[in-house]
Amino acid sequence: MKKKASQQNLSGFAKFCSAQENKARLSLILAAVIVVGTVGSVCAASIARKSDVLIPSENVELNAAQNFLAQAAIESGTDETADIIDVSDFIDETLETNPTTGNVKRGGLTGEHVVNTSDLKSLSDEDLVKAIVSGNAGVIAKKDIVIDQSQDTKPVHHGSEAKAPTPTNTPTPVPTNVPTPTMQPITVVNYELGIDVSVHNGDINWSKVKAAGVDFAFIRCGGRGWGEAGNCYEDTKFATNIKNAKAAGVKVGVYFFSQAKTAYEALEEASLTLAKLNGMSLDLPVVMDWETESYYRTWKLGAEDLKNCITAYCSTIAQNGYTPMVYLDGSNINRLGSYFGEVFSKYKLWYAYPYAVYSNGSWYKTGDTVPPRSYSYAYWQYSWHGKVSGISTEVDLDLKILGKTTLGVPKINLPSTEINTEAGKSIDPLGGVTATTSQDNTVTSGITYTITDSSGQTVSLETAQQTVGTYVITYAYTDSFRGKVTTTATWTVTEAAPPSPTPGGEGDATITPTAGGEGTDTPTPTTQGSGEDTPAPTESETTESASEETSGGNSGSDNSSDNNENNSGNNT
């Protein structure tokens, strides 16, 4: 930009006079000053200009001399010369080529030279954005940003919550006359569950938040007041929330509540964000949370101005090693108009579009619909009324979109649908049974079964194993994504077969012979002689004979007992 020389530039001459470097150059410049004082118009005509350079040099002597010569030309009455003289026309070529000769630090429009905030403020939005994108604007020091904590008021969400569209690609399971419902493959999003919080959510127990199933959190680091003053403020619980969330294993990102109306304000907001981060590592992006309402200072901001604000913030964040992202609702996406493609070809989108179905505090579940849009978004804020263990207030709920997956039909795999056993035989109903999940994984855990008899009554496994009859085994498996599926097998229990013959049982032809018993071929001995009587047996002989008869009787009794046991077995 071109700027008129002014009386204020004379202050630089004092610096010039106090400089001790390059005395030869100093003498030449002082001589030029004396000549100018005598013949102003001639000196003015001899001023050398570099109109292609816009940045003032950091070399004290050259700046002071340049300013003094310009002022001399004005005082000599050559106003047309003053109009074309740019006091910021001169840049120190030696400092460009050898930066170590000066006190160079990060920041400033050249990327090397220190430029104060008034220089940045003096640029148009267009020129400032160009300087930021090219890496020449740097970061505004925190001490140069007005911090006013009274500007931090509790946010109130306005606007209606949308009704979730009826799913078109998720058919409702229709029960048939078989236990397993009819299903078709469906396409669903892969996701992680998250929240976004600020000091207004109070003291947070991050261990409970993690245990409740929260994967990530965006934590506010600061903001700008929505009133006309529009000063910045810091989130006083930012450091505590970041530390404790990380310690609990919750992935973290950061957001700044933006009310930027100009590129310079957006640069301020990015600079304060970076000051709060102080180089810490993050898992998720750094977000410009730009919002507006009819009574906000940003309400009438136009498309190009909003584009410039987003570019200024996000480009500064990116140049400092973080991934930038923008939070917008549908109306503000529309506010960008034709600049939408330019902005979101470079930066991620966090889409604010809450569904009324989650206003009761419930969380998104697999198979729930997401906003159908022709453009992509990395995160979706789907509720303002979340209820999360460890947080005493309502909290915003978010979804990180990880991509899409086609879920198949979960099923239970049986070795056979027909089982036949005899009464008394044990079985393992889960032996060889597996389940295929909707993501095509094979598992053996999580499968259950029940057994019912022919009358539909549930019976235990032990009872069914012992009792003749026909049973139905119903298997069930609950898939993590698609719910419960079932299948059945028929189990028939029959009478046990007769046991195998044992020695001495029916059919054994072996007969134990007895002395003198029936069926032997041994003749009864007789005493040979003619006409002589048989002598009577002695007492010992009588006793021995009685003993033999008793033994033979017991043997017969044992055989009878065996036959009775076999017959008893046949009548079973």
Image (cartoon, helix red, strand yellow):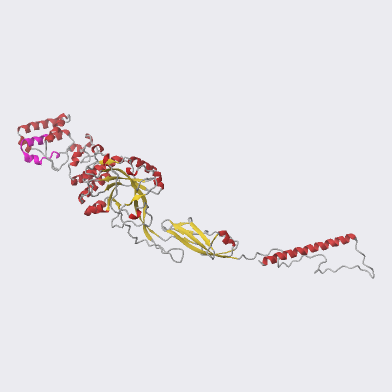
Q: Percent from the top left, x then y, of residue 258?
A: 26, 45
Q: Percent from the top left, x then y, of residue 466?
A: 59, 61
Residue shown at the point (75%, 64%) measured from the top left: 559
Camera-side residue: 108 or 444?
444
The residue at the far right in this view is: 531
Residue shown at the point (23%, 37%) measured from the top left: 144
Quarter residue 224 falls in: top left
Q: Percent from the top left, x then y, of residue 534?
A: 92, 67
Residue shown at the point (85%, 62%) measured from the top left: 545
Magenta stretch: residue 492 in it? no
For this view, does 228 lie left or right of residue 508? left
Camera-side residue: 514 or 337?
337
Residue shown at the point (77%, 63%) measured from the top left: 555
Quarter residue 197 falls in: top left
Which range is magenta?
68-89
Residue 524 appears in the picture as rendered = yes
Most common SS among magenta residues: helix
**Above or below for 485 versus 237:** below
Magenta stretch: residue 88 in it? yes
Q: Quadrant of the C terminus?
A: bottom right
Q: Percent from the top left, x then y, of residue 66?
A: 12, 36
**Above or below for 551 versus 209:** below
Camera-side residue: 177 or 426?
177
Q: Quadrant of the N terminus?
A: top left
The residue at the far bottom in this view is: 531
